Amino acid sequence: MKLPWKTRGIVLTSPLTDEIDDVIKLIDEYLAPCGFNLIFLQVRYRYQFKKHPEVWGYDPLSLDDIKRLLSVCRKNSIRLVPKMNLIGHQSGFPNEPTDGILHGHNTKECDIPDGLLRAYPGFDEQGDEKEINYARSICLSNRAAKAVVFELVDELMEAFEENTIHIGCDEAFNVGICPACSKKPKAELISSWINSINDHVRAKGGTVYMWGDRLLSTAETGYDEWEASKNGTEQARELLSRDITVCDWHYGKYDEYKSVEILGNAGFEIMVSPWRDISNAKRFLDYAVKHDKGHIKGLLVTTWCASGDLAKCILYGEKGRWQHTEEIATTLKELYSKL
Ligand SMILES: [Zn+2]
């Protein structure tokens, strides 16, 4: 699919350590020839943080592993940028078979804390969890949490030799619930947390990328409660620094993707982020191209499967381990391949 934007990005999950070679091959022999020039590596806590080994996730990557990935990206003029989740998605359930990739789910049994909340249960926003509980959130009033988060951000950017980071912030359902947070408007909690991370990153000359769903309301867009907010967080849109790049992800089928205009009118540059359903991805991209007022920086394809699983599926024609991997591989091939 021909797209008018220079930036062609993809989100990959951090590879399992015994699949790093496969992912290096995927980058070198498939993604680079397809014209991808930006990779956000979804690290979560799967890195051997030196300052905070207590938060290490499953099968964490070493600094040397990151340097190997960096090397193949540089060889192919691809920018490799770290990605974390710095509000929601602090819990989930493992992919099947277990490979350390936590996914969303809305049943209680799947509520496994990720690195930060496992090490520091007191950082949990501890919502009432009656509706959606698979994605625990960090308490945005907790100063100790912020101090740890800043140190993790610094260490990760240093490892990637980067001044830029994607901070996630999608599907943050538990916001403004605990006694300290409930005294403040949700929009203010979210915007002051993100703006402070942004100030920190801007001071290093870099850019913060984040997902856009909490900056949109279900009422104004017609999106579902994953793709937009039902609890007033969209008011943070007016309070956020405009030098943050908002990644506008949509996976559902809609007649209009109004967020493209809403975020542009609010003064943000955006990335357009489809996923696995090929017709929905096409529909969203077509809409974005037609409604681009010069505010769209580029494409940011999402995957969410284990990157090694995707590599083996694409490179060797293996059957995907996760239920969605083969569809993701097919969409990648059919929509974005230049091969
Ligand atoms: Zn709180």
Image (spheres, rainbow, N blue to C red):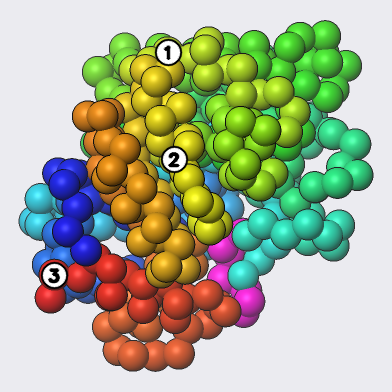
Q: Which mark is residue 27?
A: none
In the picture shown, does residue 330 fall above or below 155?
below
Q: Name the element at disc 1.
A: loop
In the picture provided, is 271 more to the left or to the right than 279?
A: left
Q: Mark 3 points at which residue?
A: 338
- Kindly report which numbered mark, 2 or 1, lies closer to the viewer in this rendering: 2
Where in the figure is residue 42, as x and y percent of width and height?
44, 50
Nearer-the-camera pick, 75 or 286? 286
Q: Is-magenta flag for residue 121?
A: no
Residue occupying image coordinates x 32% and y 53%? 286
Answer whether residue 297 is visible to the viewer in this image.
Answer: yes
User: What's the magenta bit mostly, secondary-structure-wise?
Assistant: loop
Is label 2 in contact with label 3 (beta carbons under 8 Å)?
no
The mark that comes first in sequence, 2 or 3, is 2
Task: Tell me the kind of residue under disc 2.
Answer: Asp
Nearer-the-camera pick, 96 or 234? 234
Task: Tell me the kind of residue under disc 3.
Answer: Lys
The mark that comes first in sequence, 2 or 1, is 1
Residue occupying image coordinates x 63% and y 76%? 96
In the picture shown, does residue 315 fall above or below 34?
below
Task: Tell me the kind of residue under disc 1.
Answer: Ser
Nearer-the-camera pick, 229 or 316? 229
Nearer-the-camera pick, 207 or 269? 269
In the picture shown, does residue 220 fall above or below 39?
above
The mark that comes first in sequence, 3 or 1, is 1
Q: Report how many numbered discs are placed on residues in the image.
A: 3
- How far apart are the two marked residues, 2 and 1, measured between alpha carbons? 16 Å
Point out the stretch of residues depicted in magenta.
96-102
Instruction: Please rate how many residues cluster around mark 3, counting C-alpha atoms within 10 Å: few if below 14, some from 14 to 19, many from 20.
Output: some
Q: Name the residue under label 2.
A: 248
Q: Name the residue under label 1.
A: 241
